[in-house]
Amino acid sequence: MIYRNLIFTLLLSLSLTGPSAVSAKDTPNTGKEMHEEIIATMPLVKGKLAEYVNQVGQRIARHLDNTDETFTFTVIDQPDINAFALPDGYVYINRGLITYMNTEAQLAAVLAHEVGHVTASHHARGKRAQIGSNLMAGVLAILTRSADVGEASALWGTSLVSGYGRNMELEADELGSQYLFNSGYDPQAMIEVISLLKDHERFEKKRAQESGKEVQTYHGLFSTHPRNDKRLREVVSKSGSFPKAIDAEQNITPFRVATEGMIWGKNFEVGALPKNVYQNKNLAFQVYFPKEWNFSEKTPLIQAENKLKNARIDITIMARSVSVPENFIKNNLKIPIIKKSEAFTQSRLKGHTGFVPGENGLPDQRLAVIYYGRRAYVFRGKIDSGADEAQANSDFLNIIKSFRPISKRSLIERKPKTIHYVKATENTRFSRLARHLKLNKYGEDELRIINNYYPAGEPKPGEWIKLIR
């Protein structure tokens, strides 16, 4: 639970800071480099929803005053509620946040808020350039939910976690509201987004209280604002108002079309495994390779080699026939003696490793055997003459020790739930819908929140509402 709360705290910092703690002037191409790292590491939403979000974002960007900044808008395929920005105009929004919106104007409000942080240069004014390259480690630790959160937290430091404060948030709101108005959207959408996120916060507190767990509320965009925020309403009203004869655009229909069928909650179909991970679903195991290594599957072998192609490792799968891996090396592999022979245990699996003496002037070669189920997994490392032996053997050992069984249950194919729109009738009730759709204990509450009817109220006949199925 502490880990979860730390992630939300760091997300707060990202959202408050907007473009990040590093000035683009101090670190050339920082935003671009971080963006490339994120899109290479994180699952992204593609297709019509991504195109739609970019379209809305670019509409805002076209109506900025006195800026030649180029903006890139990206949708991250995660259910968490968050949006943030990096230097050089890179703006991100999680799929999970979009599921709670009901109009294009609300989507535009979130994007405009983040754009406001960028154009106001809050990162430079925050005097945090000392964070440097450590910022990326924090970003990825958050987004990938890395186990090394303690290390990431130390890299960021308490000054980064503190955020930019209410004044800069209000400035981003004021700029964002003006951008909304200039783009033809109703600036009041900024306040609408706060209202729906406060509903979500209220629901999370209820769920946490009933489950006896710590409260996990949203600590991202707009988190510094109370529901009835007088100062926010004042800065929003400054952006202007449309004549009664001209309606500000909400664009409800385009939003509904773009979000029809979007995934709700966890996306079980996302290939979230990093490129350096090999996973075998039939045998239920996985292995991590160093990032610069290439690997391929050639039954019954998995072959991998380093970037310089002077160190490689083969993984062979064989039937086990003796009690311990050490005897398997002697009896099955016909290797009577190995140097630095050592038994080990990982993930409750028995293993044994050591070195086979090199021949023809080659270095000693790493060997390991791991027992898993009825099979023996044989790792054979090979180092060419002149290669960096210490680095190669370190890589070999990391590969061997990364071998992990996978729960069969986690590999069961599951289809994600999706958002769909229907028109309500005079008999439509959220409680009935939740039972009919066989949603969880809090299904009715979730339907109410995504349809802006939390905690009470029922849809009107003929009104378009969202379903989760």
Image (cartoon, helix red, strand yellow):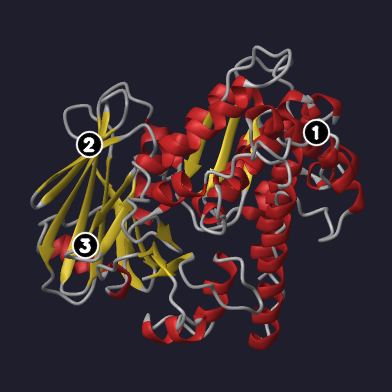
Q: Which residue is mark 3?
A: 281
Q: Amino acid at mark 1?
A: Ser
Relative to 333, say whether 203 is above or below.
Answer: below
- Whether residue 234 sits left or right of residue 300 in the image: it is right
Q: Which residue is mark 2?
A: 358
In this rendering, which labeled residue sits more in front, label 3 or label 1? 1
In this rendering, which labeled residue sits more in front, label 2 or label 1? 1
Could you classify mark 2 by the number of other residues whose Cα lies within 10 Å: few (under 14), some (14-19), or many (20 or more)?
Answer: few
Q: Amino acid at mark 3?
A: Lys
Q: Can you give x and y, in whole percent of width and height, for residue 269 in the image? A: 31, 57
Relative to 56, say whether 329 is above or below.
Answer: below
**Quadrant including the N terminus:** bottom right
Q: Looking at the picture, tell me which residue is in the foreground, 254 or 388.
A: 254
Per the image, label 3 sits on a secondary structure element best described as: loop
> For residue 306, what is the image quadrant?
top left
- Whether residue 305 sits left or right of residue 417 in the image: it is left
Mark pair 2, 1: CA separation:
75 Å
**Residue lying at 41% horizontally and 69% vertically, measured from the top left:** 468
Q: Can you give x and y, in whole percent of width and height, for residue 91 in the image? A: 59, 34
**Quadrant including the C terminus:** bottom left
Q: Amino acid at mark 2?
A: Gly
Q: Can you give x and y, in whole percent of width and height, for residue 456 in the image? A: 65, 79
Q: Which residue is mark 1?
A: 239
